[in-house]
Amino acid sequence: MASVKFDHITFRYGTNTILEDFSLRLDEGQIMGIVGPSGCGKTTLVRCLCGFIKPEKGSISIGDTCVFSAEKRINMPPEKRNIGVVFQDYAVWPHLSVYDNITYPMRKRRIAKEEIVKRADYALSQVRMTDYKKHLPSQLSGGQQQRVAIARALVTSGKLIVLDEPITNLDLKLREEMLEEIRLIQKNTGTTILYITHDQEAALRLCDRIAILDAKGHLCQTGTDEEIIYRPANRFVFTFVGVSNFIPVAKKKDGLYISVGEQMKIRDGIPPEINNLRSPVMGVRPMDILFNDSSPIRGEVKSATFLGNLYNYFIQLGNRQIRVQQNTLDVLRTREYREGEMVGLEFARALYYEEPHEGVEA
């Protein structure tokens, strides 16, 4: 197991700044997810860590070893950093058997034959591919090829593995299975994993901690899945992770009202966190809006869709349309709502933000 530390990393392509003064620590034995929109610098960060590209400033450490320092002029070559990497396209060699794919990196490093056999057999057992060692990649499913790529990463390094969008090319069922596989492998080996993805749901399911990057590569927040969901650091995190509704609110002497063409009171008193907001909006997730027939907040069901584990509704609330989601088990205990029906709503949990104005980022 190995920890990873990025300390004030800056990287530019010409005049285009990808990462600036970026710092992050990954504890050993942990799965850390790096999540952000396309182009935010996730892959650039991986390439800096692996030594494929050189940052302009800062330092990178793996465990107690500094593998890069601009100030100290340290730049350890990639092959000496001992990082196992799994890419989106698997990158398994089609002409080599499963066993030869896994042993190739060790043979290149001239590891003793007995050690190669020992490591390869262990890695194959960890990914449950022992019975497929003589197969060619063309004889394997996408999920099996991905397990071969993970096994090859394990023999490269049992301490640190980087997974760069490793399940994007798999179908939904295989993606879910691979998330479980990765978690099981990590549990059995204790390997530190850096998981790079734009898929927030996958990161929430798999990772011990998550780091959220915005479109400009700024680190907005690190935390557990509960911290990210329930205590987002800013509006970008709230919007990026999960589905969200934003509803304008108005402050009055007797309480807080939603302002949707008409005004409907949602609570007595004014939350202290909105006192300094010029144009406050309420951010609320679809699962945090409850149906309450006795509520004075009324809207019309415009769409009702059954999605298996939940019901998805679009509700016309004044001049705003919002999304409401209800767990299927809750529907069984109450009832399903139909299109065209007038319903009462209650906001169980909400956060408050400034409404972005022209020229101001959300």
Image (cartoon, rainbow, N blue to C red):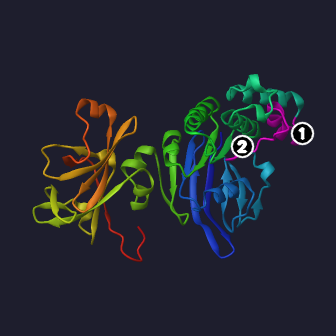
Snapshot quadrant of residue 217? bottom right
Question: Residue beneath label 2, please?
Answer: 90
Where residue 259 sits: x, y (%)? 21, 64
Q: Nearer the viewer, residue 348 or 207?
A: 348
Instruction: Answer whether labels 1 and 2 touch (C-beta < 8 Å).
Output: no
The outermost residue toward the front is: 340
At 80% from the left and 32% from the top, the residue drawn is: 136
Snapshot quadrant of residue 337? top left
At 66% from the left and 60% from the top, the residue drawn is: 44
Residue type, numbered disc 1: Arg
Q: Nearer the viewer, residue 275 or 327?
A: 327
Query: Would you say 151 lies left or right of 362 here?
Result: right
Query: Would you say 108 lies left or right of 192 here?
Result: right
Where residue 188 sits: x, y (%)? 62, 29
110 to 254, vertically: above or below: above
Residue type, numbered disc 2: Tyr
Distance Cα–Cα, label 1 vs label 2: 24 Å
Crowding around mark 1 (Cα neighbors within 10 Å: few <14, some 14 to 19, many 20+) is: few
At 73% from the left and 35% from the top, the residue drawn is: 148
At 61% from the left and 61% from the top, the residue drawn is: 41
Please state the extent of the stretch shown in magenta in the rendering: 84-111
Identify the mark at residue 110; answer none if there is no mark: 1
